[in-house]
Amino acid sequence: MKSFSLLLFPLFLFFHVSAQKKNAAFQLPIKKAISPVTIDGIADERVWADAAIATNFYMMLPMDTSLADVRTDVRMTYDNENLYLLAECFTYGTGIHMVESLRRDFAFLKNDNFLLFIDTFDDLTTGFSFGANAAGAQWDGIMYEGGKVDLNWDNKWVSVVKNYDDKWVFEAAIPFKTIRYKKDAKVWGINFGRNDLKTTEKSSWTPIPRQFPSAALAYTGSLIWDEAPPAPRSNISVIPYVLGGVNKNYEQAAKPAYTKDIGGDIKVSIGPSLNLDLTVRPDFSQVEVDKQVTNLSRFELFFPERRQFFLENGDLFANFGYADIRPFFSRRIGLGVPIDFGARLSGKLDKNWRIGIMDMKTSRVDANALPAQNFAVFSLQRKILKRSNVGVMYIDKTSLNYHPDAADSLKGVYSRYNRNLGFEYNLASASNRWTGKAMVLKTFQPGVDNKDWTYAGHLQYSSRKWLLYNQLQYVAEHFNPEVGYTPRRGYMKLNPQLSYFFFPKGSNILSHGPVINSTYYFNTGLKETDHSNIYSYLVTFRSKATLTPLIQQDYVQLLTPFDPTNTGKDSLQTGSRHRWWTAGFDYVSAPQHLFTYTGSLRYGGYYADGKLLTIGSEIGYRFQPYVNITLNGTYNRLSLPQPWGRNSFLLVGPRIDITFTNTLFFTTYVQYNQQMDNMNINARFQWRYKPASDLFLVYTDNYLPGPWAVKTRALVLKFNYWWSI
C-alpha cells in the first residue's frame, strides 16, 4: 500500500492549513421590523425603506474580474416568527424572462433566478437555501459539504414574485421554526446568487472565483443581527397519508388487486438543530419513475434514491465513500418489500458535531422466503479546522428470527447479518481550492475472513485555469456491503484527471482547453485488467453553449464471462482481451432559448473486434412558464461477429411537464426501451393545496410493444396533510 500512503501524504499536509473567512468584510446588518410585512412583491412597507441594502454584486460568469452588469438589491428584516427577504432583480433590455416552468426546485442554470444561502452556524459547511425563478417557482434545500444543495428537503415557507417593466421582485417569509440555528448567535454566514440568462451573467453579492458555485459557503459574507434571533422553539409536525389504488397483472391473467393504506410521518425538532423523523408504513407511490438506460455495462447500474424519507439530511448517510464504493445505499431498503416502520435522528449537535442515526424494519416476504430484516445506520462527523471533517459510519443489516428450513432454502438463502464499519477524512481548504478524501472500510459477516479491508482516497486542486485530480481505490475481494453499492470487487484503481483552460479576449468563445481523464484497474496482485483513456477538448461559448470533441482508448481483460449485448445470446470467455478506439463529440445548446437541445455521438470499436455507434440527444421546448416538453433519445448499433451479429437498441423518452400554477402540476413520462422490449407510461397529477400538503393521482402502464399488449397497469390516489403542532 505504498502508493496509497503517498496519496494520503498531501491530504494530511493540508490538514494543518487554516485561514480566515475570505469575505468576512462583507456585512449586512439586519434590524427587527417595527411594523407588519405583507408578502406581495411590493416594497411599500416602511421597514424596507429603513433596511440595509446588499448591492453591487460581483460577476462570476462569464468572468469573475468585475462587478455585475445587471443590478440586484437585497434587503432583510425579521420579527418573532419569520425571517423576511426582499430582492429587486433589475433587468437589462427588453424581452421575456427565461424560466422552465412553475415547478418547485428548478434547474439553476436554465432559469432566471435569485437564491439565498444562509450558514446559520457560520461553519462554512452546512446551511439552507431559498429562492425563486422569475415566474415565482420556489427553490429550497439543505446545504452540505460547503457548497452542495439537497433540493429534496421540502418545508413550509411563503413567497411571491411580481414582475415590473424594469425588474422582477422576490419577497419571502421564512419561519424560524423551518430552519435550524444556534441559540443566541448574532452572526450568520450569508450570500445571494443571481442568474440572468438574457445577459448570460451569473453574479454573487460577495466575490467568488468562477470555478466555484455561488453556493460556496467558503465565500459567504456575514449577516449581523441587531439582537439574537428568537430562541428556537419546539416544533412538531404530523404528516399522515391515506391511499387507495388498483393494479392488475395482465401477463399472469390475474384479477385486479385493490389496495388501501394509511400511514404517515412525524417530525420532531429536538433542540435548536436536531430533527427526529418517524415513519409508519411509508408509501412512495408518488415518487417519479427511474430514467431508463440502455445497459451495455458489465456491472450493476446505479439509480439514484428518490424517496423523500431517505433524502432529507441524506449527505450524512449517502455521501460516505465514493460513487462506486458506497457502504450505505438506501435503495437496498424497502424496494419491493414493505417497510413496517422507521426512525431517523439527524442534524447538528453543536457547531462542530453532526450526527445521523437511522433504523428501519421491513416485513417478511413469503414468496421468496425473505425474512423480516432490520437496518441500522450510525453516522457521526466532527468538524476540524475551518472546513474539513472526520467521520465514522456503521451499518448493520440483520435478518430477524431467521432459521431457514429446506423449503425456504429452495426459494432463497440470506445472510444472518452483514455489518460494515468505516472511517473517513474529508479535506476542504479555506479557499476551497484544495479538496480531498481518505477512507477505510471493513465488512463483518459470518464466514468472511480478514481479506475485506477497503481503502480509498483522492486529492483535487481547482483554480481558474487548472483542475488537477488523482484518486486511488483498493477494494478487497471479500468486501461485501449488502446495504451499499459496490458493483466491482477485488481491484485497485487509479484515476488521474487534468484540465487546463484558456480565456481569449474579444471572442465568442469564453474558454477552451484540453481535458484528460484516465482510469486504470489492476487485480489484487497488481496486474492490469483494464483501462480507459479519454482525451477531450472543452469549448465554452459566451452564450453558455458547450462543444466537446473527444477520442477514447479502451482495453479490457474479462474477469468473468460477458455478453456484449446483455441479451443472453452468448458470452465472451473469461480472460479474453479486447482493445479499441472511439471518437465522438458532445454539444449542449445555450440555455437562454425556448428551444434547447443536446447532441452526443460516439463511433468506434467494441468487444470482439466489433463496432459500436451511439447517438444520443435531448430536445426541449418551453411554452413558458406553463409547459415544458422534452424528448430524450438514445440509439445504439452494435456490429459483432456471430452469434450476436448486428443489434440495434433504441431508447426514447418523451416527457411533458404542465404547471398550471406553482401549486398545480401534471407530468407525463413515456419510456420505450427496445433492449428490455418494454413501453412504460407514468402520469402524475399533483395539487399542493397547502404548503407541504399534497394530493397525488398516479397512473402507470407497462406495455409489450410488439403486439402492443398490456403487461401491468396501476392507478393510485394519495392524500397527505402537513399538520404543525
Image (spheres, rainbow, N blue to C red):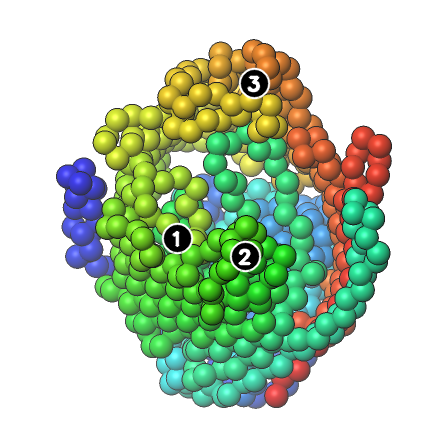
Identified by mark 1, the residue type is Pro
Q: Position of residue 49 (x, y in %)?
A: 58, 76
Relative to 52, is 19 above or below?
Answer: above
Give the foreground label among 3 and 2. 2
Identified by mark 2, the residue type is Asp
Residue at x 23%, y 30% (from the top left corner)? 526
Is 363 left or right of 42, judged from the image as shown?
Answer: left
Callout 1: 10 Å neighbours few (<14), some, many (20+)? many
Of the 4 image quadrants, the one containing the C terminus is: bottom right
Q: Position of residue 112 (x, y in %)?
A: 63, 51
Element type at mark 1: loop
Q: Which mark is residue 246?
A: none
List the residue tagged with mark 2: 408
Q: Position of residue 368 (x, y in %)?
A: 59, 55
List the residue tagged with mark 1: 481
Residue at x 61%, y 61% (from the top left corner)? 366
Element type at mark 3: strand
List the residue tagged with mark 3: 612
Callout 2: 10 Å neighbours few (<14), some, many (20+)? some
Q: Considering only order in the chain, which callout, 3 or 1, is on the residue closer to the N terminus?
A: 1
The residue lying toward the viewer, choosing from 344 and 694, is 344
